[in-house]
Image (cartoon, rainbow, N blue to C red):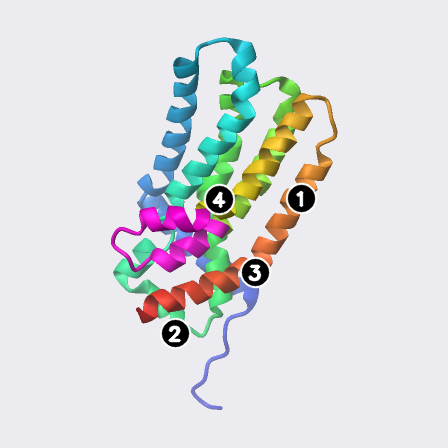
């Protein structure tokens, strides 16, 4: 029919949304610098709080790194759709001919590039500070890379549900923290298995399964949550 424009292809629409979000994020650097600063500061405070004993720090290191990384991802999730809601871009997303699934998928990937990836790259340095044995470093990096990606998708669901609320941070925490727990358990387990000289492939496989489910199903839930928030 005349006057109708075909919807952009999946790849071009995905890349266009991803590029837009990355460019906007670099104009608002605090959105992704604050979670990194939080991760760095809290990890540095633990040796001061519990003492400098290397053996004690080595035992606590996997749990400390994962819990602080989880909280940093939670801190970053609240802003995922906030600017789009404030400037009206969210309404344009909902009426756009581009699939909302593609748009939220691209936005979540951009969120991980800006938060989860830097946390993953920073984690080995902080692991050295916490005296994590060297044989746990590889497991830590792989588990963090997979786990933080899953956390981004889970966090985006809560961010979509609370985007229209002025003080949605507490509600966001209540919604998504229980969903973070399985990722936390297997992420810590992978690092502890590696430190103990055991095979950690099983834990990474489970984290990979979580990520596969998140990539497949979470964008559908995110899109539905954004429509609910827009209607309200």
Q: Earlier in the sequence, mark 2 or mark 3?
A: 2
Q: Earlier in the sequence, mark 1 or mark 2?
A: 2
User: Mark 1 and mark 2: span between their CA atoms?
Assistant: 37 Å
User: Mark 3 and mark 4: span between their CA atoms?
Assistant: 20 Å
Q: Is residue 143 above or below residue 137?
A: below
Q: Earlier in the sequence, mark 4 or mark 2?
A: 2
Residue in the image at 42% along x and 30% along y: 39
Mark 2, residue position? 95
* Residue 171 is inside the magenta segment: yes
Mark 3, residue position? 217
Quick one: SS at disc 2? helix
Quick one: SS at disc 3? helix
Mark 4, residue position? 113
Residue in the image at 37% along x and 25% along y: 41
Q: Is residue 13 visible?
A: no
For the record, the magenta segment spans 154-176
Foreground: disc 1 or disc 2: 1
Circle 4 packing at 10 Å, graded few (<14), some (14-19), many (20+), is some
Mark 1, residue position? 206
Q: Is residue 72 above or below residue 64?
A: below
Quick one: SS at disc 4? helix
Residue in the image at 42% along x and 51% along y: 175
**Secondary structure character of the magenta stretch overall:** helix
User: Mark 1 and mark 3: span between their CA atoms?
Assistant: 16 Å
Circle 1 packing at 10 Å, graded few (<14), some (14-19), many (20+), is some
């Amino acid at each position: 029919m005349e006057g109708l424009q075909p919807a952009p292809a999946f790849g071009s629409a995905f890349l266009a949304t991803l590029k837009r979000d990355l460019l906007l994020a670099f104009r608002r650097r605090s959105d992704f610098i604050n979670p990194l600063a939080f991760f760095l500061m809290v990890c540095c405070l633990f040796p001061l709080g519990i003492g400098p004993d290397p053996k004690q720090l080595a035992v606590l290191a996997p749990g400390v790194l994962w819990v602080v990384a989880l909280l940093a991802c939670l801190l970053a999730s609240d802003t995922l759709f906030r600017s789009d809601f404030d400037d009206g871009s969210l309404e344009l997303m909902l009426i756009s001919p581009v699939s909302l699934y593609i748009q939220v998928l691209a936005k979540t990937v951009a969120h991980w590039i800006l938060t989860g990836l830097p946390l993953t790259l920073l984690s080995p340095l902080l692991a050295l500070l916490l005296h994590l044995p060297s044989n746990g470093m590889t497991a830590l990096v792989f588990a963090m890379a997979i786990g933080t990606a899953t956390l981004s998708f889970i966090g985006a669901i809560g961010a979509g549900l609370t985007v229209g609320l002025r003080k949605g941070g507490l509600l966001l925490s209540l919604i998504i923290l229980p969903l973070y727990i399985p990722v936390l358990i297997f992420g810590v387990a992978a690092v502890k298995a590696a430190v103990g000289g055991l095979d950690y492939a099983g834990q990474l496989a489970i984290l990979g399964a979580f990520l596969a489910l998140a990539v497949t199903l979470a964008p559908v839930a995110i899109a539905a949550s954004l429509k609910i928030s827009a209607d309200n």
